[in-house]
Amino acid sequence: MGLLSATQAAKAVGKSVPTITRAIKSGKLSATKLDGGGYEIDPSELFRVWKAITNSNSVTQPMLERETPKEDSVLRAKLEVMDERLSDAQATIKDLRDRLDAESAERRSLTAQITDQRQSAPEPRKRGFWARLTG
């Protein structure tokens, strides 16, 4: 096995690329910086720091560990804000639905009252021409 890139090294030990580069920058892991960017990492140096993954099924387990606490806390904060916004929006929707239901019930009630008044009111007698003229 030759030298590994940061991406290959991350896959070989089940870590994220930012975890590998942070280890290099902090001096925990030795690597050679390339002119075009990136790193070359000796596999023996990599496996000195982390255990190699031997089973393809075990790749997902280490990748799920919290290796980036700063990003994790930022994402958790954003998630909390989004949850608050969602609950506010749901409360607003519920309030608007309740108001709409109340207004609809009031409208039906008023319509029923008007209809009842029209039906119960006697029709005015039509007076003839001479009755209107003589009073």
Image (cartoon, rainbow, N blue to C red):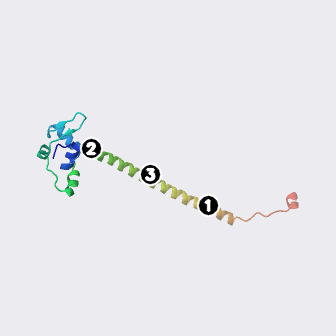
Q: CA distance from mark 3 to mark 2?
A: 31 Å
Disc on the earlier residue, 1 or 3: 3
Query: For residue 71, which numbered disc appears in the image?
Result: 2
Foreground: 126 or 77?
Answer: 77
In which image quadrant can residue 106 be found?
A: bottom right
Secondary structure found at label 2: helix
Residue 126 image point, x, y percent: 81, 63
Residue 86 image point, x, y percent: 39, 51
Q: Nearer the viewer, mark 3 or mark 2?
A: 2
Residue occupied by mark 3: 92
Secondary structure found at label 3: helix
Question: Dot 1 surroundings within 10 Å: few (below 14), some, or many (20 or more)?
Answer: few
- Residue 68 in view: no
Foreground: 1 or 51?
Answer: 1
Q: CA distance from mark 1 to mark 2?
A: 59 Å
Foreground: 62 or 56?
Answer: 56
Query: For residue 11, which numbered disc appears in the image?
Result: none
- 45 displayed left or right of 105: left
Q: Nearer the viewer, mark 1 or mark 3?
A: 3
The vertical placement of 59 against 112, above or below, is: above
Disc on the earlier residue, 3 or 2: 2
Q: Are marks 1 and 3 in contact (CB under 8 Å)?
A: no
Query: For residue 111, which numbered disc appears in the image?
Result: 1
Q: CA distance from mark 1 to mark 3?
A: 28 Å
The vertical placement of 31 against 135, above or below, is: above
Quadrant of the drawing holding the C terminus = bottom right
Label 2 is placed on what type of residue? Glu
